[in-house]
Image: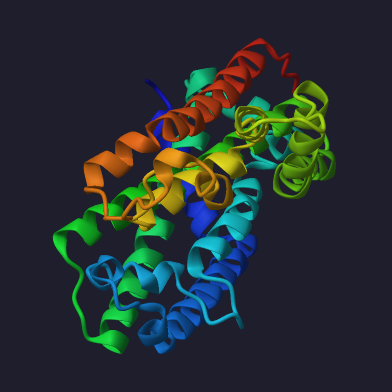
Amino acid sequence: MPGLAPVFRKEIADHFSSRRFLILLALIFIAGLAATYVAAQSIRDAVTSSGAQARFIFLLLFTASNGQLPPFVAFISFLGPLLGLALGFDAINSEHSRGTLSRVLAQPVYRDAVINGKFLAGLTTIVVMIVAIGLILSGLGLRLIGIPPTAEEILRLTSFFAVTAVYVAFWMSLAIMFSIFFRQAATSALAGMAVWIVCTFFVGMLSGIMANLLVPLGPDATLADVVRLQDTQQALARLSPVTLYGEATFTLLSPTARTLMPLQLLGLLPEARGMVLTPLPWIMSLQLVWPQIVGLVALTVVCFVISYIRFMRQEIRA
């Protein structure tokens, strides 16, 4: 495709040299270092006498916490969308504002090469950043606890970072879509922040309200009614990419997680009483959250397809 490689190289250079990217990268890196250090210091208390967790000590570096700081997975779930939004909120409308888009398209460059190059450059930047942070934090954790990861833990961490890359790519794709629909960079940034705030803070509350309206519990409600209410609430909450990412990462980094049902409700089921939480193999944990991963990929593709169609039909004047 003529023009794709130059656009890709230019966007890569812009991303790695932009101050906002460096600031967010430093913020995520510092938060990850602090969370990993705290987890390493408290990892002896986090390992229980059961051999389930003792087999996966290295994973505790990314999930354990002493209460002073959230674990690394919580930091990346909160700060990852900000990185994706920062990479794409002015991808197209800034070109309109500077008048450079018409000049680029006046060259032998296909229009779809512009948006494809911007998306691929942003995705490459995300992958490089996540791989770099993952390797640095893993090396720090290895130095602190002195226990190398097993093959099972390496597979789980690789899956975790791959899902994280898809999660951040969704927010970048959403930001690119807003940068096409809104000509002002401030408006597209506010739209992306609004979606992030709703998905992070309000979806859980709204899903509970909607579930109570759809499946009301009477005074003589049975256990089946409670389970139906919980299933409805989970289905509504999964409309948010934050929920999908949280369920996927929790299952991948917690080998003893055998179901996505809340533990309080799981304890009420007769078939779950006395169940021993033995760790699942990596492939079974991946199969358990495969619908969540496919959902994140589908949301990313849908946002990019909408952006692609809108950009290809958009009128561009000098």
Taking the view exactly as shown, the residue that stands out farthest to the left is 151
Q: Quadrant of residue 255?
A: bottom left
Taking the view exactly as shown, the residue that stands out farthest to the top is 313
Judge from the rendering whether residue 129 lies leftward or rightward of residue 171; answer left or right: left
Image point 26% across, 80% down: which residue? Answer: 142
Spot occupied by residue 58 in the image (x, y as percentages of width and height): 29, 72
Q: Is residue 114 visible?
A: no
Q: Is residue 312 visible?
A: yes
Residue nearest the observer in this picture, 120 or 4: 120
Spot occupied by residue 190 in the image (x, y as percentages of width and height): 82, 44
Judge from the rendering whether residue 211 lies leftward or rightward of residue 121; answer left or right: right
Coloured how? rainbow
Spot occupied by residue 184 in the image (x, y as percentages of width and height): 83, 37
Judge from the rendering whether residue 208 lies leftward or rightward of residue 42; answer left or right: right
Relative to 146, residue 25 above or below:
above
Taking the view exactly as shown, the residue that stands out farthest to the front is 220
Relative to 197, residue 233 above or below:
above
Image point 44% across, 86% down: which residue? Answer: 42
Image point 66% across, 30% down: which residue? Answer: 222
Residue nearest the observer in this picture, 217 or 256: 217
Image point 53% across, 30% down: which residue? Answer: 300
Relative to 110, residue 46 above or below:
below
